Amino acid sequence: MTGYKNGIANGTNGHGGEVNGQTKNAPAYTAIENSLTKRQQSLVKDDYHVKGDVAFDEMNLWNGKLQYTNGINGTNGVNAANGVNSIHHNSKESPPSQISNFNDVMSYSYEIIKEIADYLLEKTSIRPKIGVICGSGLNSLADFLTQTDAFPYESIPHFPISTVEGHVGRMVFGYLEGVPVMCMQGRFHYYEGYPLSKCSMPVRVMKLVGCTHLLATNAAGGLNTKFKVGDIMLVRDHVNMMGLAGNSPLQGPNDPRFGPRFPPMTNAYDKELIKIAKKISVEMGIEKNIHQGVYTCLGGPNYETVAELRMLRTLGVDAVGMSTVHEVITARHCDLTVFAFSLITNKCPSDYDSDEDEANHEEVVSVGKQRQNLCAELMCKMVRAINESPQCK
């Protein structure tokens, strides 16, 4: 209980309480009051001012809500379905980058995801079959699209904002090889302060606008000593390090409209698409630069120590980055077929006396730009092959 109060108090102090916000949204506050017990009501009144037009300090509220849940086990009170919906309806005119309700901090409801999808479908006539996520330095893939409709993230209701160099921050609808696709020019990372459910939220949007496939790219450090900078690793499996630490994009109540409570991950990356990619690499004459391997995602933003890299090698990891895994988990949860590859942008040192340079983001972006045309060509050919496959019909 104390943990909850401290967590919420931190968030309150960060933004001054905003009593006016509570007054403005009195109906929403009343609705959430009605969904709580008297004891929970007093906690909300004393420690948490509901605000309709001011963004919360996400991390303080995130920590506070977790501690609140653990402290009083108030599942119904925390979820407070009627109250949350009322707050959402009372704050539709808030800027998209602001948090519109208590539950936004943890996850997005089906209704909010559908609202985002409906908004995009109203703004474009394109009905995508394939969703694409561009990694660091690989944003030029969207330049290959034709008949495009582009939406900056800040213009999309409830969407986070990408803050990392090398991530443009747009959702682009268009045609790639004549195939309707939607392309994320920039993704969201855990180290930016977003919970994993928010980082992977666009994947669910892809599902609701009609996509059947997710193609994800990333920039990664090469752990496998056979990899060279500029090589491409087709991801055949992953090690979910953040998940092993108890952090998952599927945490919280499960909505069966997205998928099952306990989705399997044994074959998260489609074997047939990996075979197709290998065949395409031969046609492109780059088969010597194409590998298969295991990817892992760490929280970042710091790069890994030598001891951590040794541990990852022991686990059988071939490449390491700070994304993709939670997106793939979310995609498989909602039954999207997944293909992913990593562009190896640096080689990870194997010992303390290694001659390898320390990893840095400038190098990651630079290598991405150097190899972006090659990666785009591979992706274009993959999109064409998927469109011709029975899965996409």
Image (cartoon, helix red, strand yellow):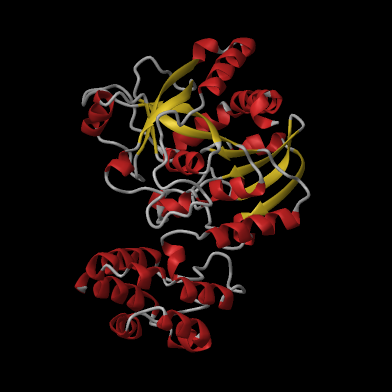
| Left or right of 96 on screen, residue 303 | left
**Of residues 221 and 190, the one drawn nearer to the viewer in this rendering:** 190
Evaluate whether residue 55 shows in this view: no
In the image, is residue 65 above or below residue 202?
Answer: below
Query: Which residue is rendered at x = 45% and y = 22% of the image?
Result: 229
| Left or right of 41 on screen, residue 267 | right
Q: Quadrant of residue 95?
A: bottom right
Q: Quadrant of residue 380?
A: top right
In the image, is residue 263 above or below residue 222?
Answer: below
In the image, is residue 67 above or below residue 324?
Answer: below
Quarter the N terminus occupies: bottom left
Query: Which residue is rendered at x = 22% and y = 23% of the image?
Result: 353
**Of residues 106 and 30, the one drawn nearer to the viewer in this rendering:** 30
Evaluate whether residue 36 shows in this view: yes
Query: Which residue is rendered at x = 56% and y = 23% of the image?
Result: 273
Quarter the C terminus occupies: top right
In the image, is residue 48 above or below residue 391?
Answer: below
| Left or right of 171 on screen, residue 5 | left
Residue 102 position within the rendered picture, expressed as x and y whole percent measured from the top left: 43, 70
Residue 250 position within the rendered picture, expressed as x and y whole percent measured from the top left: 41, 50
**Of residues 253 and 318, the one drawn nearer to the viewer in this rendering:** 253
**Of residues 106 and 351, the one drawn nearer to the viewer in this rendering:** 106
